[in-house]
Image: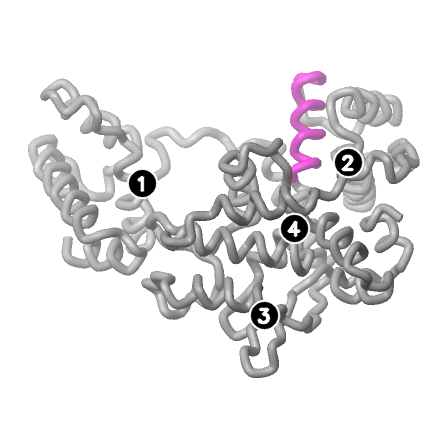
Amino acid sequence: MAGYARALASRGYAARTVEDQVRLVAELDRWMVSEELSAAQLTPERLKQFVQTKRRAGHQRLSHRRFTSLLGYMRELEPVPESIEPAAANAVEILIARYRSYLERERGLAPATVSNYVMQARAFLRERADRQQGTDLETMTAAEVTHFVVRQTRRRSPGAVKMLIPALRSLLRFLYVDGITHLPLAAAVLAPPNWNASSLPRPLEPHHVAALLASCDRRRIGGRRDYAILKLLVRLGLRASEVIALELGDVDWRRGEILIRGKAKRLERLPLPSDVGEALGEYLVCTRRPDVRCRAVFLSVIAPITPLTRFGVKDVVYHACKRAKLPRIGPHRLRHTAASQMLRSGSSLTEIAQVLRHRSLLTTAVYAKI
C-alpha cells in the first residue's frame, strides 16, 4: 500500500487524492478477502463486481475508472490479466502492428508521420473488412481502392484527403512487397486534385491573435503553459509535434536560441524572441515536475503529470478559441499566421523560410499566401 501511495505522489497526484485512493484500495482489499480472491485474480470484470457491490451499498458515484491507476501500478509489478476470457487477436490489428514496425524500422519515418499513416491504414482496412466480411486481401482489386478514395473525398476536407493519399499508397506498397496482395495497387490511388492557395487556411488577423493570447489566465499554471505554447505557435510557427518535442536543455538562455526537432529528425536552432523567452520562463518557474527525469518542457497540469501530446497542443488552441469566442482552428493555422505576420512586418521570403525551416521558397510563398 505504501508503494502505491509513493507511486501516485511521484506522478503528481495531490495528497488528498492519494489518501482517497489508498482508502479505496483498502476497501477493495477487504472485499477480495471476503470473496477469497488473490491479487492474480483481480481483473477488470472483478473490479466491476466490486463497484456494483459498493453502488448497492449507496456509493452511487463510484466508477471502475477510479481503479485505472491501480491496474497500471500492478502491471508494473506483475502482469494483470486483461480479461477472464481474452478475445482472439484481431487480424486487422496484427497487420497494423506489422505495418507500424515497417514504417518505423525500415522506412525510418517521423513519429507524427507514422501515427498518421497507421490511422489511415486502420480506417481503410477496417472499412474493407466490414464490406467484405473478412480480412482476406489477396483478392483486393484496383476498383476497390479507387472507390474507397472517392468515398473519402466526399466525406473529408481537401486537406484531409491530401493526408490520406500518400498514406494509402504507402500501405498498398507494403502489402505488395510483403506478399499480402498479388497486385501493385499503389498506382490505383488517385492523385489529389491540385487545389490552389484559396483552399489553404487563412491566417488570423492581428486582433484575433491578441484575443487568443489574452484568453490565457496567466495567474494559473495552466494559463501560463497555454500562453507559452501559443507564443511558440504564432511567433515561431512551430508545428504541434515540435512543441511537444521541446526539452529543458533545448533553450539556450545565454545565447537567446532554441533548438527545434523538426521533420525527418532535423535539428535546427532559431533565435528566441524576447517575448517568447519571457513566456517560457514564466511557465517553467512555476511548473510542478514530480519526476525529475522528465525533460519535456510542456506537461499536463492535472495528475498524472505527463508530457503533453500533439492532441494536448490541439486542445490548448481549441480551448483558447472557445475562450476568445473565435471559430475553432488547429495549431497549423497559427503556422500560416506566423508566416503572414512576418511578411506583414517586412521580413523577406528567405527570412520567413529560415524561421519556418522550409527547404523551398515556393512552400513559404504558399504559407504566406503570396
Query: What kind of element bears circle 1?
Result: helix
- Residue 180 in view, yes or no: no
Q: What's under tag 3, amino acid-wise?
A: Ser
Q: CA distance from mark 1 to mark 2?
A: 37 Å
In the picture of the structure, the residue carrying the numbered disc 3 is 274
**How many residues crowd around disc 1 within 10 Å: few (fewer than 14), some, or many (20 or more)?**
few
Given this view, does label 4 or label 2 mark the residue nearer the observer?
A: 2
Residue 68 at least partly seen: yes
Q: Nearer the viewer, residue 354 or 241?
A: 354
Please state which amino acid type lies under the numbered disc 4.
Answer: Ala
Q: Upstream in the sequence, badge 3 or badge 2?
A: 2
Q: Look at mark 2 in the image and give the residue it sits on.
A: 159
Residue occupying the point 82% across, 43% down: 173
Q: Amino acid at mark 2?
A: Gly
Q: Which residue is mark 4?
A: 112
Q: Tag on residue 268? A: none
Q: Secondary structure at mark 2?
A: helix
The location of residue 270, given as percent across then percent down, is 68, 71
> Residue 238 at x, y = what percent?
66, 57
Q: What kind of element bears circle 3?
A: helix
Residue at the spot x=55%, y=57% of the render? 244
Q: Amino acid at mark 1?
A: Thr
Mark 1 = which residue? 68
Residue 144 place in picture, x, y as percent? 83, 22
